[in-house]
Amino acid sequence: MDFSSFLTSLSTSFVIFVVLMVLFARLSSRPGNKVIYYPNRLLKGMDPFEGGNYASRNLFAWISEAFSSSERDVIAMSGVDTAVYFVFLSTVLGILVLSGIVLLPVLLPVAATAKTPTTSSNTTSNGTFSDLDKLSMGNVAEKNSRLWAFLIATYWVSIVAYYLLWKAYKHVSALRATALMSPEVRAEQFAVLVRDIPPAPVGQPIKEQVDSYFKSIYPDTFYRSMIVTNNKEVNKIYEELELCKKRLVRAETIFAASKTTAKPEGTRPTNKTGFLGLVGEKVDSIEYYSGKIRELTPKLEAEQKATLRDKQQAAAVVFFTSRVTAGAAAQSLHATMLDTWNVMDAPEPCQIIWTNLTIKFFQRQTRQYIIYIIVALTIFFYMIPITFVSAFTTLENLKKYLPFLKPIVNIAAIRTVLEAYLPQIALIVFLALLPKLLLFLSKLEGIPSQSHIERAASGKYFYFTVLNVFIGVTIGGTLFATFKDIEKHPNTLITKLASSLPGNATFFLTYVALKFFVGYGLELSRIVPLIIFHLKRKYICKTEAEVKEAWYPGDLGYATRVPGDMLIVTITLCYSVIAPLIIPFGVVYFGLGWLILRNQALKVYVPSYESYGRMWPHMHLRILAALVLYQLTMFAYIGAKKFVYAPFLVPLIIMSLIFSYVCNKKFYRFFCCPALEVAAHELKETPHMERIFRTYVPPSLCSGKVEDDQFEDALSHVSRAGSFA
Amino acid sequence: MDFSSFLTSLSTSFVIFVVLMVLFARLSSRPGNKVIYYPNRLLKGMDPFEGGNYASRNLFAWISEAFSSSERDVIAMSGVDTAVYFVFLSTVLGILVLSGIVLLPVLLPVAATAKTPTTSSNTTSNGTFSDLDKLSMGNVAEKNSRLWAFLIATYWVSIVAYYLLWKAYKHVSALRATALMSPEVRAEQFAVLVRDIPPAPVGQPIKEQVDSYFKSIYPDTFYRSMIVTNNKEVNKIYEELELCKKRLVRAETIFAASKTTAKPEGTRPTNKTGFLGLVGEKVDSIEYYSGKIRELTPKLEAEQKATLRDKQQAAAVVFFTSRVTAGAAAQSLHATMLDTWNVMDAPEPCQIIWTNLTIKFFQRQTRQYIIYIIVALTIFFYMIPITFVSAFTTLENLKKYLPFLKPIVNIAAIRTVLEAYLPQIALIVFLALLPKLLLFLSKLEGIPSQSHIERAASGKYFYFTVLNVFIGVTIGGTLFATFKDIEKHPNTLITKLASSLPGNATFFLTYVALKFFVGYGLELSRIVPLIIFHLKRKYICKTEAEVKEAWYPGDLGYATRVPGDMLIVTITLCYSVIAPLIIPFGVVYFGLGWLILRNQALKVYVPSYESYGRMWPHMHLRILAALVLYQLTMFAYIGAKKFVYAPFLVPLIIMSLIFSYVCNKKFYRFFCCPALEVAAHELKETPHMERIFRTYVPPSLCSGKVEDDQFEDALSHVSRAGSFA
């Protein structure tokens, strides 16, 4: 890639960005689009924007709104998790800005005025890309004393990172504490999850066993328990019933709509009863769904009762009347064996993965390790399934298994394109599926909460991107080109790899620029959701509920967003000293990201759960991992320059490990379990325990006509007086 | 060592053993010696033995008494820790017996009938020690299919070990649970240690800060707190006072004794006031010590008050009125940062290391790692300090620094002996000092309880003995002899080491035999304490208290006893298949040990603390470490025999690691912190909180004339009503 093509790529991205920004300014001021650009505010019952007048708004009003918003606004609109994500963005931004202030004015002149090294092997970039190359470390000769500047720069970046990370961890700790000590009653602070309940003695229901167990340990603060049931059947019926209700409303809406026109009696909508509504008998929709609802409602009630009575499983949610007791119980060993009566703090009801609660202790452990092995294999050998899929998706196979494609495939032009792109398409499909796969695998581990699953998947994805994208791109070519050499002298591997670093800097410059111009442009303008929404509203949605479903915004999606940012952190850090020009790009990425996501957090996305900043330790650890990778890279690269003082970087690596250890020891435990000091803060009101309990009952079990009494009977086999003690 | 010298050594040891046994039988039946042979029973206010008639006792009555004693007796007489030590002994005994039953009848014929290997390099034992060698695995030729028997034997021993260890861990867990759920009130179950108390706000005493902190978290169950004070000064005065009191009693006893004789007015004892009572003015003892006591008592009182008021430190013992709350508090995070308000379960008052309580969190961590490094260096380079000491203790240096030795050293005979033995003496002194050094180092780590320090020292000593004695002896010679070879081909190291194994078997046979015959003979007969006691009583002791001090027996001494046994476990396991003849020796060691220590535990030793079996996980882990070492040895040795199926042992090693992981996960946590289920058991009586609190006040602070009121005032700055809530 030469200099002009670099500029072309950059300016193209920039043009796309400008176009998207203009689109955003135009589209977001239209009242009809407010559900796309302000759904979070609308759902919270607020005006889309304070003024209320769409037309008179300044095109850049959103920028000043984003800047003027405080952390408290973010927490109020989008929760602690989002605020923590902004701490992450601003910490990285701070590291890059502070590094850039020193590194750019110092290192660029040092590199530019250095003589071109006598051995030309270090300028590995192809073509005549000399202008940018001159500004990188590749321009400094071996053993040159100018390398001191780069070595000290490595220290500077690291120390800035330690300082800001330490401050950020303290700040996030305080954010979490403030949220947890809030006087608002939050159901999850009064509950614990109990797993691995041992088999009850014969004749004793699990419910009674759990109640008497916890009542004996917490005679004063135990409220009641809720045994986890196998809800597979009841959920099926419940979903069917809900679907029928939705369809009935839809049919009624269509019928009503048809009435208002010339035909006053209207057209009664019809549907087919068979597969996907495509085949089968044609029936009157309103009658059909009303009938089905009448039929399903008693079935659901019967199934609810049967589930509560007979399908109790070896897990429970236990409620306490005090936050402190719940907090202490979540951290304490209850039985002498860890694989019975395992207690942990309860996540919010909406994010509990009920089916994972009943997995036994050692099965969870085993699953975890198996998943780790699978993920490690996926990371290291991810080319293998792609190759396999590519091999399968050859044209011959396509023709064989999907014969209806034959006429198309036989057209020469299409044939050529397909033959060229099929493997790439397989790669793209695989990469697009990867986050889903990782989420799926993390769920299989037996983790009981959605937020934890997303953290686990995000961690896995981070290692995948760093290993495959960053290291893969950097060293891939070098590795294969010089494979013979390395086999003979394994020690030269690091040298070889290190010497190929500066040549790849431009690739990553372009990559980062593309990411922020196009990525954040699309993010802000929300073109795709906008188009989908308008299409859906026009052709599919009939009822209010369906329209709302079409624009409902979803959450920030940490599982993919964080690893994506982490990749940029890794790239920018690793190249910060080698090619300091990358720092401004990193600054723009995180600065623009902060600005645009601030807008999105305040106005668009609705968090689907609240984990009170538990994501932070993961982010922190991964920034540190990137920092260590950076230090190792610098050690290898300065070593490859045959600079005898390269070992001066070893203390830095040890310092990073100690820093990580200290942070982990000091702060991490509070992110795993509630601190009692925090839980002991006073509440605004006496908690309404019955309401807290209700929030944990799955909707499929408490909906319908199941009376409270029946519910009570089914749930509580222990004497009524007892369970209200 | 040839066969006859092996037999000579064995029979010499046996003769010593028989002599010691006869001595024991004679000496223990004398009434005057009962304080040496039955101190534990005497201190518990029991008859030395049920019959009461010393003379009519059978010589071997102690054996039947030891056999007929139950585990409950051991717990009653010597505590849970001792009972757990017997579980350890009987588990190892079980492993060895079950292994021996299969291995001896199978492997000995297999080895004996094998042809002598063509390559004679494997029978490395010097001399003509062929008889025993024929019974070992060294007699089997390379690649011989008979090696299958040895491979399967390795599996058998391991599976027996897994089974018995699993059973033992369950049993010890149950023992611990039973002890902790006992209805007796034990002070330590109501208290927690609080460390790393953050600096109090200006003007607020630490006491008030701690009280209000815990009262806000545990409003119902908090009883009161006791701030740790810097007791250095007060302890000094207290000890001086106690010494004076003792001396006064002694002087009065001497005076009274002198009166009964011909001189009715008696001789008033005198002493010198200077250094060690050797120099200075001669004074009347009774008057002098009475005067000193009169002078010290108000000084102590003043110092007690000053200490309680002004020397409060950032650590405390906090008392709760409920075992469950104390148990939960000990496991819970209190502040958001782990390095403030760190809470852990309290050890017994007698074993708290007060000075370690005030060490800060990260200093503890740092100390720990520094100590680990020091210990690792000691283990690997323990010859260096010895060489250094040897070099220093040359005759020339001795003459230089200790000139009074000159005339002795100049005698030719003594000179020769000294020159020959000085390095060995240095080695022996160093080895004798090692346990003390390890205890000292472990204490420096900042561990707050004596039992934990002993566990930590015991672990360090284990690694020392296994690495230096076992591996050192086995491979030392080989390593240096073939150092050149190994440098060229590092892969042959294991082969070389493995092939030298069978030759060393006889050395260890003798070692084990010596250990049990002489070691346990001395243990049972208690010759050394007996002689010391009689000497002291005759020449030093005057008062009752002094006599009691002279015979007070001390405890089992886990810090050195357990690693000693562990070394035998390691040796016996590692040689069990290579030279199965070692198994009977191991069986005798642990059988005899069980029997003799049962006697000692029931009648002699008085435990100095109770940790409710916390030693067990350490024992378990080290038995497993020995097992893995054994499996690795077998893998290397069978590999050295060029047996292609040697990799069949790899699954076994993995199995050991999984077994260790599962045990650790399932059982270990209960040994770290109390299980609430256990703590929730009902008590016999309402705990007398004031008495519990008193047991934790150091004697130097609560003795003397400090009234309860004053104490109260000094300790409690918070309103009185509050602290009794």
Image: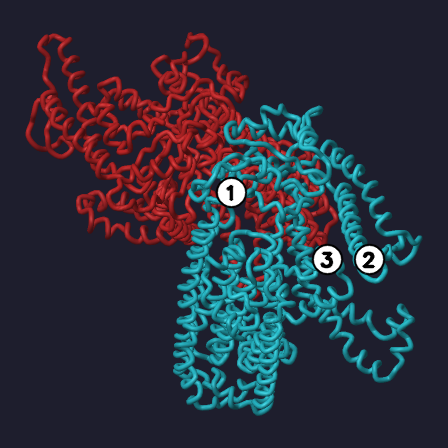
Chain colours: A cyan, B red
| Residue B139: % across, % down | 66, 46
> Amino acid type of disc 1?
Val
Q: Nearer the viewer, residue A270 or B665?
A: A270
Please check whether the numbered discs 2 and 3 fall on a single chain. yes
**Label 1 SS:** loop
Is residue A645 visible in the rendered image? The answer is yes
- In contact (CB < 8 Å): disc 3 and disc 1: no
Q: Which residue is mark 2?
A: A259
Q: CA distance from mark 3 to mark 1?
A: 32 Å
Residue drawn where x is 33% and y is 38% of the image: B210
If you read the primary sequence from the N terminus, does the residue marked by circle 3 or circle 1 appear first? 1
Q: CA distance from mark 2 to mark 3?
A: 21 Å
Please check whether the numbered discs 3 and 1 fall on a single chain. yes
> Amino acid type of disc 3?
Glu
Q: Which residue is mark 1?
A: A185
Q: CA distance from mark 2 to mark 1?
A: 48 Å
Q: Nearer the viewer, mark 3 or mark 1?
A: 3
